[in-house]
Image (tube, grey):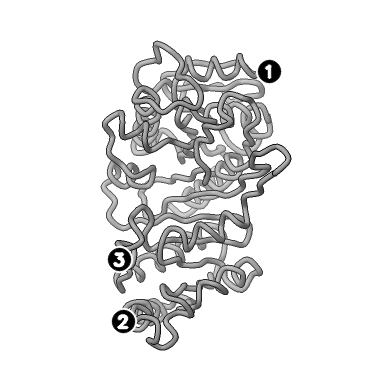
Amino acid sequence: MRSNLKPLIAVTMGDPAGIGPEIAAKVFENNDIYKKCRALVVGDIPVMEETVTRAGDPIKIRKILTPAEGLYKKNVLNVLQAGMPSAKVCEPGKVSAAAGQVAFAAIKKAIQLAQNGEIAAIVTGPIHKASLNLAGHAFAGHTEIFAHFTHTRKYAMLLVHGNLRVVHVSTHVSLRRACDLVKKKRIQDVIFLLHEACLHFGISRPRIGVAGLNPHAGDSGLFGSEEEMEIEPAIRAAKRAGINVEGPIPADTLFSKARGGKYDGCVAMYHDQGHIPFKFDGFEWDEMTGTMKSVRGVNITLGLPIIRTSVDHGTAFDIAGKGIAHADALQLAIDYAIRMARYRAEHK
């Protein structure tokens, strides 16, 4: 059933010592955002006030207690306080327990809002894992936080930029451990999650390519047995379920084929196997300025009962507080959240 009401999106501020508050403010400077959705920031009001004042942004912060109180119109930035307001704004570029606690409180509050049905989707700003852990929250990252508080067991990280959509069998573990996690059941689950996600993006018959773990996808067992013992059986099982999937394909050719349009989605066996081609495609370094010229790409957590998208870059402590951060990745993450929220509303 189609709803004419624009989806309500919550953007978490991210680490207050990073570029999260700045890129959030920049997104709301572009008044086109309210043409697509209703959106608010969940975070720390003093931090967002300081960010807007420092940048001289022509927007007014509206303090709200619930999403329903928001005023979703031009030049208004609705901010919902998570936890206690900061007594002191965190110093840009510095790791601290205080910053980690502010970031964590925003994430937890946004999850609660989504679980209560008060918002349609969450878009997360970048966090710093060291600050998060100093604050006493022992999580490897956003994905694990969302899985924990939503009690989700089958989940995966999906990266999206243009034609390239990459999902991972494992992410934040050592490379040695990642090899041990290449198992039929997990690979099969990830293929199914990717297939479902592509449907949500409007791809009616997704074509999925699965990477091998070893050089040349094992070369018939010459360079390893994981392809024959784990990956191929998972692919056969997915095919029997009606999924259009191929592999295992050598990783050194899979991603270029996907970028060119042969596949709608790729399954990577471990973190860097998927992240390196993705960031090579979406990130652009500017040697003249010594900064990233562009950091385009979206991170989506699959398998959750709620929608979560994110930028796929870090806190950029080296440029935090300088007003030069790019908000293009955050805008893309919001666009994907809107698309997924609309699909979910129409297929209830």
Q: Amino acid at mark 1?
A: Pro
Q: Position of residue 52 (x, y in %)?
A: 60, 18
Q: Which residue is mark 1?
A: 58
Circle nearer the viewer, 1 or 3: 3
Q: Is residue 39 depicted above or below 65 in this figure? A: below
| Residue 87 seen anywhere in this rendered image of the structure | yes
Residue occupying the point 39% across, 42% down: 142
**Dot 3: what SS?**
loop
Q: Amino acid at mark 2?
A: Met
Q: Which residue is mark 3?
A: 181
Q: Is residue 66 depicted above or below 297 in this figure? A: above
Of residues 205 and 189, the one nearer the viewer is: 189
Instruction: Report the Cα–Cα distance between label 3 and label 2.
Output: 13 Å
Residue occupying the point 33% across, 46% down: 144
Q: Quadrant of residue 100?
A: top left
Q: Position of residue 207 (x, y in %)?
A: 54, 73
In the rendered structure, which disc, 3 or 2, sits on the residue that comes first in sequence?
A: 3
* Circle 2 residues within 10 Å: few <14, some 14–19, many ≥20: some
**Dot 2: what SS?**
helix
In the rendered structure, which disc, 1 or 2, sits on the residue that comes first in sequence?
A: 1
Q: Position of residue 308 (x, y in %)?
A: 44, 45
* Circle 1 residues within 10 Å: few <14, some 14–19, many ≥20: few
Q: Which of the numbered marks, if any, corresponds to residue 322? A: none
Residue occupying the point 44% across, 75% down: 212
Q: Is residue 312 left or right of residue 221?
A: right
Q: Which residue is mark 2?
A: 229
